[in-house]
Image (tube, helix red, strand yellow):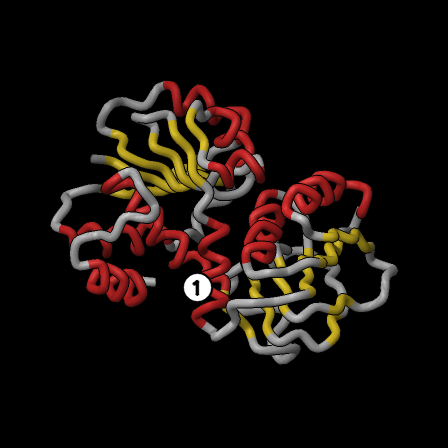
C-alpha cells in the first residue's frame, strides 16, 4: 500500500518518518512519500490514483480542495470546509486537525478555556476555532491582516455558539487564556499578546517560534503528532476513534521519529 503527504511546500514535512514509524510497529509494509501539489492540480491527481493508494495526508494550501473532492465528509470537514485526511479508495475525507489541537493543549494540562484567540485565517484557523469551542471557549478574537476576510470564521463561530470578533493590525494586543497561531514563519507581521496561559504555534517547520518567551509554548509538532495518530487509525481501520493494536507502542515510535 502507498500513502503520501500532499502540499506546497511539502519538503519540510515530518509526516513520512512519523507514519513510517507507526506502520513498522504495526508490521505493515506500507510506503509513505511527499508529493508537491497545487490546488488546481489536486482533483486530476486524486482521480488518477490506483488501488494501491491507501491514504493521503493533506496540508496547506490543499485542505479546502481536498474537502471539495470528497463524497463522504466527516462532520468537522462539513463545518470547516477543510480536510487534512483522505482515503482515495472511499473518496472520504476527515479533519483530524481539530482533535490534534485539543489533544496538544490537553497534554499540557489545558482542557478548558473561556476566552481565547487565533492569529491568522484559513483552513487551520477554522480547525482551531472548532477546537477552542470544544474546549469550552465562548469568545474567540481572531487577528487578521485583513479583518474583512474573516467572515467565514464568524459564521463558523455562530454555528458553534462562539462569539468571534475580528481584529486587525492596528488593534490592541490580543487577550485570551490560550492562543493558537496559524501564521507561517515567513509572515512579517504578528500581533501583540496579553498574558496567555499558553500559545500553540502551528508552524513547526522552522524549529523555532516567534512567541518564545511570551508564554509557555505548545509546540506545533505536538499538534502534528496527535492528528497523525488519528490519520493512522483512519488509514488502517477507517475510523479515527478506533484503537490500534499495540497503540501505546505505535505512539511511542511516532514521538521518537518526530
- What is the quadrant of the N terminus in the image? top left
Report the residue that reaches farthest toward the bottom: 213
Of the pair 4 and 120, the residue shown nearer to us: 120
Residue 33, x across and y down, in percent: 31, 42
The residue shown at (64%, 55%) is 183
Dividing the picture into quarters, in which one does residue 208 lie?
Answer: bottom right
**Residue at x 32%, y 50% (from the top left corner):** 16
Does any portion of residue 138 appear in the rendered image?
Answer: yes
Give the number of marks: 1
Q: At which x and y percent is residue 122? A: 64, 44
Q: Is residue 243 left or right of residue 164?
A: left
Q: Where is residue 227 in the image (x, y as percent from the top left)?
A: 41, 53
Label 1: which secondary element: helix
Q: Give the residue furthest to the left.
A: 27
Position of residue 185 measured from the top left corner of the image (x, y, whole percent): 61, 59
Looking at the image, residue 208 sits to the left or right of residue 152; the answer is left
What residue is shown at x 42% (from left), y 33% (from top)? 93
Query: Who's the residue at 48% across and 43% down the image?
Result: 59
Looking at this view, is 74 or 8 the one in front? 74
Examine the rendered structure and indicate whether residue 112 appears above or below residue 10.
Answer: below
Q: Which of 4 and 224 is in front in this view?
A: 224
**In the drawing, does residue 225 fall left or right of residue 175?**
left
Which quarter of the rendered picture does the C terminus lie within?
bottom left
Per the image, the residue denoted by label 1 is 222
Observer-nearest of 130 and 118: 130
Q: In this view, does 219 lie to the left or right of 244?
A: right
Amino acid at each position: 500500500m502507498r500513502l503520501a503527504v500532499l502540499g506546497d511546500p511539502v519538503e519540510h514535512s515530518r509526516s513520512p518518518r512519523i507514519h513510517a514509524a507507526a506502520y513498522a510497529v504495526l508490521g505493515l509494509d506500507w510506503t509513505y512519500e511527499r508529493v508537491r501539489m497545487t490546488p488546481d492540480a489536486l482533483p486530476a491527481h486524486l482521480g488518477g490514483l490506483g488501488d494501491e493508494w491507501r491514504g493521503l495526508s493533506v496540508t496547506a494550501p490543499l485542505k479546502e480542495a481536498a474537502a471539495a473532492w470528497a463524497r463522504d465528509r466527516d462532520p468537522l470537514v462539513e463545518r470547516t470546509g477543510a480536510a487534512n485526511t483522505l482515503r482515495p479508495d472511499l473518496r472520504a475525507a476527515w479533519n483530524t486537525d481539530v482533535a490534534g489541537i485539543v489533544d496538544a493543549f490537553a497534554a499540557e494540562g489545558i482542557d478548558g478555556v473561556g476566552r481565547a484567540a487565533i492569529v491568522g485565517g484559513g483552513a487551520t484557523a477554522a480547525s482551531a476555532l472548532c477546537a477552542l469551542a470544544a474546549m469550552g471557549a465562548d469568545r474567540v478574537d481572531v487577528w487578521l491582516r485583513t479583518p474583512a476576510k474573516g467572515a467565514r470564521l464568524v459564521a463558523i463561530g455562530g454555528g458553534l455558539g462562539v462569539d468571534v470578533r475580528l481584529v486587525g493590525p492596528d488593534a490592541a494586543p490580543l487577550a485570551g487564556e490560550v492562543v493558537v497561531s496559524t501564521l507561517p514563519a515567513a509572515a512579517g507581521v504578528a500581533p501583540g499578546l496579553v498574558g496567555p496561559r499558553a500559545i500553540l504555534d502551528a508552524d513547526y517547520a522552522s524549529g523555532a517560534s516567534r512567541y518564545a518567551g511570551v508564554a509557555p509554548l505548545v509546540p506545533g509538532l505536538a499538534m502534528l503528532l496527535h492528528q497523525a495518530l488519528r490519520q493512522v487509525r483512519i488509514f488502517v481501520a477507517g475510523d479515527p476513534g478506533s484503537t490500534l493494536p499495540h497503540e501505546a507502542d505505535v505512539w511511542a515510535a511516532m514521538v521518537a521519529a518526530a
